Amino acid sequence: MTDLATYSRTGPVGTIVMDDGKANVMSLAMLNALHAAFDQAEKDKTVVILKARGRHFSGGFDLNVFAKGSAEDQYLMLKAGAELALRILSFPTPVVAACQGNAYPMGAFLIMSSDHRLAAEGNYLIGMNEAAIGLTVPRFAIEIARQRLTPTYFSRVVMTAEMFGPAEAVTAGFFDRVVPADALERSAEEVAGKLSTLDMAAHAATKARARGAVIKMIRGMIDEDITPQYGEDRIRSRASA
């Protein structure tokens, strides 16, 4: 795997860190690096902490690809992102997301797909701003949001593109709790340590049972919506704009 996403293991806990030196955008390279890191975590059977370095947890999908990329580039990037979110949603061991900064759509999808979600106190935002920047929210992302966001906030997040600071994001359903910024890493390690005492077979079976219907639904949506034709359609739409 590349340095865009590194994996390290301490006992039963594996830590995946995103760091592209900028905004941790979800380029195809970043997404492939994350998949490789989760491959290793799955092989090791570790509880996963997913975190990032810098001011941003993630700037979301690489908008330059949507604006200027080829049909294949757009298809492959969206496909890799959707598959990663679904993978985390159904991962056989617990996944703890530790957010320290701005989390734009694809970053928000990964957080919402995780099992325990921590936010550091700070002046940053999380949300799904697609409708504000001329993008239609993918169906897979809508269903990920629907199963984690509170009904009061769901429409505000998905359809009116509101972004929220950490405290209100807990109320909305993006996070489980906010911790002091200097305690984020320690808090994530404590949560992961406690989760590592679970019976992992029972955890995986319960997760499959609890999320089975939405996982099946999202699987079908990815297969139906994110095909090479998706990229070709976006190119035609871009040319006619």
Image (cartoon, helix red, strand yellow):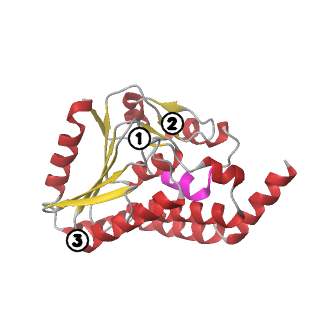
Return the x and y of residue 5 as percentages of the image width and height: 37, 56
Residue 70: percent from the left, percent from the top?
70, 62
Alpha-carbon span between mark 1 and mark 2: 8 Å
Mark 1 secondary-structure assignment: loop
Which kind of residue does numbered mark 3 sit on? Asp
Mark 1 touches mark 2? (CB < 8 Å): yes
The magenta-colored residue range is: 137-144
Q: Please give the label number shown on residue 197.
A: none
N-terminal-most mark, 3 or 1? 3
Instruction: Measure the alpha-carbon separation of dots 3 and 2.
Output: 37 Å
Determine the main secondary structure of the stretch shown in magenta. Answer: helix
Disc 2 residue type (three-letter): Tyr
Q: What residue is disc 1 on?
A: 173
The answer, for residue 86, to whether it is visible in the render is: no
Asked whether the residues under the numbered discs 3 and 2 touch, taking CB atoms below 8 Å apart as contact, a structural biologist would say no
Residue at image mark 3: 44
Residue at 46%, 57% in the rendered image: 30
Q: Marks 3 and 1, how far apart in space?
A: 30 Å
Going from N to C along the chain, the mark reached first, 1 or 2, is 2
Mark found first going from the N terminus, 3 or 2: 3
> Percent position (x, y) of residue 168?
41, 29
